[in-house]
Structure formats: C-alpha cells, structure tokens
Image: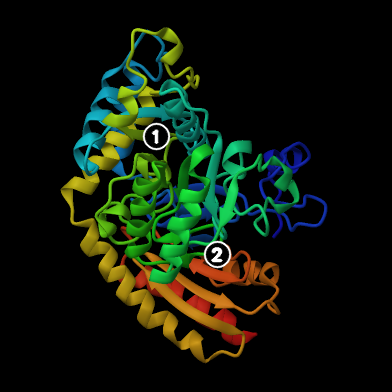
C-alpha cells in the first residue's frame, strides 16, 4: 500500500490506534468513503465490509433515511445539555425502547459509549442496594466475556485470560466463574451465588454470544438459569446486549429467545445504526423506584456530557424506523443459512477446529498455529474487510447485505484459509 496523501503521512505521526502495538503493526488502511456494504480506500480499492464497523453498521453505510434524519436534526439542534433540559428525539427514543423491550424495562439512561452504559448499570446496581440500606459492591461475571475497556467494565470481563488479564488487579473483589451450560452447572451456579449473595450487587453477562471473548455461543436456557439463580439469591441481573441487540443473533434482542426480563439491559452499536456514538442502560421500574424518593441523596449522580445527544437520538429513531419497516428477523435467517452453507467447506481444512453460525454471526475457529496478522492483508487483496482475532476468523456483516456480496465474504474466507 502506497499512500501519498499529506493527511495520512502527517497524521500517522500523531495518532494512537486501538488494540495496536504501534511499533510493530502494519500501517492501517485509509478509508475515504462508505456506501452500502462497501468501504472505499484512498487508492480507489473497494472492500465489502464483513465486520459492520465493529458490529454497528447494521443498515449498511449512508442509509438515506438515517442520513436525512440527521440532516434535519443538525439544522435545528445538534445537542443541548440533558441537565434540566430534555429534547424530543431523546424522549421519543426512550418511549420506543420501552415499547420494544420486554416486561417493565421502562427507564432509559443515555450515554455515549457501550462501556459507559455498562458502568452506569453497575453503579445503578450498587446504589440500588445502598438506597435500600445494604452495601453490596461485588459483581459475578464469567470467563470468556467482555464488557468494555473502561475500568469497571474491564473488571467484569475475563480478568484471567482476556485482553485485560495483565490489569487483573482492577478486579476489586469481583467473582469470576464459568457460565452455566448444563443443568448440573446451573445447580452449582445457584449454590455459588447463594453462598456469596450477601455482598453481590449483580450478575452480568452477554446473552447467547460471548463476542470479543471469541464468539462463543450458548443456549437460551443459560439465561433462564441465571435469572432463576438471581431471583433465588436476591441478586440483580444485568444483560449486556451491546453486541447482540437488534437482530444480530436472529431475534430483536437475544433475551427474547430466553423469555426473560433482566433488571437492566445495555444497548449501543446498532442502536444508532452505527452512525453516531450512543448507548443506553434501560432499567426496570423496580430499579427506578429505589431511586425515586424525597431524599436527594438517593438520586443517581451521573450525567455524561453528551447524554441524550439529540443528533445521535435522531439517528437512533431513524434506525428503529428501519427495523420496524422491514422483517429483519427474516433477513438474518437468510444470512445465517447462507453463511452456514458457504463456510462449511472450511471444516475439511487441517487448521480448522470448528465452524459455527448464530443469526448474522459466522465463525471459523482455528488452531493456534495460524498467524492471524498474516491473514489480514490477504483478505484485503481478496476485496473484503475481515478482521480475525484470537483464534477466529468471523463475519458480522451488515444485515442488509445481499447474497452476492455475502458470497464474496464467505468465498474469501474459504480461499484464504485453503491457501495456507
């Protein structure tokens, strides 16, 4: 890759990239435009995006309905503070989320990023018990899980072998355990939670798929077992749907497949269609009622600067319009079936340990002999944007992708891995 653009050459001397060892990493690809499911690079190359910009661009790029909604909003009011003021896009979005989510998940607390919404949910859980006269500061979390890169969110990820294992001291007494996947494990988990419930505020998990931990799947019964264990132990249950929400696993929310109502749910990424930073922690009436009091000390003292960001909320309302206008569950079913068929030949390759799909998630699990960094430029040469990590090559394409473009992605995986 040869880049002559002044902005690229000068800018690379001053930028710090995510998840990157800047000394040894290859130079990043310069993207200059997006359209549909494609990224256009500075040299004119177009890549079919198989990752949806970290799982967020579910409607593809530059969707006219979202773009127009944002144009209309930016001309009137891009943002105003949410302290002492509210705005129409934020209140409409909160109302719509309450209507979409199950049970009494009725109170939306907005923020900018997914990890911040996780931290808000943890803060709510601790103060919920404080407001009731109990001090509970610990959280139960699971191996192979990930909830974000900020300190509290990091401390409820996999602090033993995840990407933040070297910072495990940030895990201030939280309890790491295995996700219950069998009835026997569910019984053991219930006993474990009851034994430790006296100072545990909440259990937190990713539903159906542990994303950044390796795209590891589990069944809906796991969520039901955790809900039952929390109810019996008197512990709150937080579900992190930042990755899984809005049809990524096939249903509108992953919890819909289990038929459960958590005490809090976090959403981001696809919430705004991947065009604006926006997240939300939605709490049940039970949680909200513990803060609703004449005592000012019982208020939730939290307020992100861009909370209720009008422009982001306008984008999110437009994103919800699209979800409501078309059958996205049917779109995902078609994507899932095609990925399952077209990734199946990978099973015959010697370095492949597993091939699995769930909803619009396709995963090829490799052994640890494969150099994933070496694969990345090979995918670019094949005309696709695929970013393997850990020991997996995976797809989370935009949900509007057509059969032909999806075949470009699956074919690239089969060809690249076969060439090894």
Residue 151 relative to residue 401: left or right: right
Q: Residues within 10 Å of mark 1 (few under 14, many from 20)?
A: many
> Mark 1 and mark 2: span between their CA atoms?
24 Å
Residue 360 shows in this picture: yes
Q: Contact (CB < 8 A) between labels 1 and 2?
A: no
Residue at x-position 38% and y-position 68%: 405
Q: Position of residue 230 (x, y in %)?
A: 39, 48
Residue at x-position 30% and y-position 75%: 337
Q: Which residue is mark 1?
A: 281
Residue at x-position 55% and y-position 70%: 393
Residue 323 relative to residue 238: left or right: left
Relative to the observer, which residue lies in front, 306 or 217? 217
Q: Quadrant of the C terminus?
A: bottom right
Q: Secondary structure at mark 1?
A: strand
Relative to the observer, which residue lies in front, 167 or 335? 167
Q: Quadrant of the N terminus?
A: bottom right
């Amino acid at each position: 890759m040869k880049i002559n653009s002044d902005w690229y050459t000068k800018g690379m001397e001053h930028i710090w990239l995510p998840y990157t060892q800047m000394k040894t990493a290859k130079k990043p690809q310069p993207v200059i435009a997006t359209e549909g499911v494609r990224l256009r690079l500075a040299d004119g190359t177009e890549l079919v995006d198989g990752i949806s910009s970290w799982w967020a661009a579910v409607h593809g790029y530059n969707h006219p309905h979202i773009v127009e909604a944002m144009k209309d909003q930016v001309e009137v009011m891009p943002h105003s503070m949410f302290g002492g003021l509210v705005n129409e896009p934020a209140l409409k979005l909160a109302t719509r989320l309450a209507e979409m989510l199950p049970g009494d998940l009725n109170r939306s607390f907005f923020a900018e990023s997914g990890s911040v919404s996780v931290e808000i949910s943890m803060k709510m859980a601790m103060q919920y018990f404080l407001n009731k006269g109990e001090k509970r500061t610990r959280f139960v979390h699971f191996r192979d899980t990930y909830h974000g890169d900020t300190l509290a969110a990091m401390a409820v990820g996999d602090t033993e072998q995840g990407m933040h294992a070297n910072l495990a001291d940030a895990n201030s007494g939280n309890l790491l355990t295995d996700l219950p996947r069998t009835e026997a494990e569910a019984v053991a988990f219930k006993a474990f939670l009851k034994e430790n419930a006296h100072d545990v505020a909440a259990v937190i998990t990713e539903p159906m798929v542990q994303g950044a931990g390796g795209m590891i799947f589990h069944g809906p019964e796991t969520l039901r077992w955790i809900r039952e264990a929390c109810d019996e132990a008197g512990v709150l249950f937080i579900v992190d749907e930042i990755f899984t929400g809005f049809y990524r696993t096939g249903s509108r929310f992953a919890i819909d497949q289990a038929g459960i109502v958590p005490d809090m749910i976090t959403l981001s990424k696809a919430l705004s269609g991947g065009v604006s930073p926006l997240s939300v922690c939605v709490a049940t009436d039970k949680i909200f009622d513990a803060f609703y009091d004449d005592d000012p000390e019982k208020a939730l003292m939290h307020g992100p600067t861009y909370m209720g960001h009008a422009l982001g909320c306008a984008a999110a309302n437009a994103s919800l319009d699209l979800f409501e206008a078309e059958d996205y569950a049917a779109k995902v079913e078609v994507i899932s079936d095609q990925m399952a068929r077209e990734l199946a030949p990978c099973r015959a390759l010697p370095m492949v340990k597993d091939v699995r799909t769930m909803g619009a998630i396709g995963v090829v699990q490799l052994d640890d002999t494969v150099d994933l960094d070496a694969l990345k430029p090979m995918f670019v040469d094949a005309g696709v944007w695929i970013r393997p990590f850990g020991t997996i090559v995976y797809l989370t394409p935009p949900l509007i992708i057509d059969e032909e473009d999806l075949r470009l992605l699956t074919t690239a995986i089969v060809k690249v891995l076969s060439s090894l």
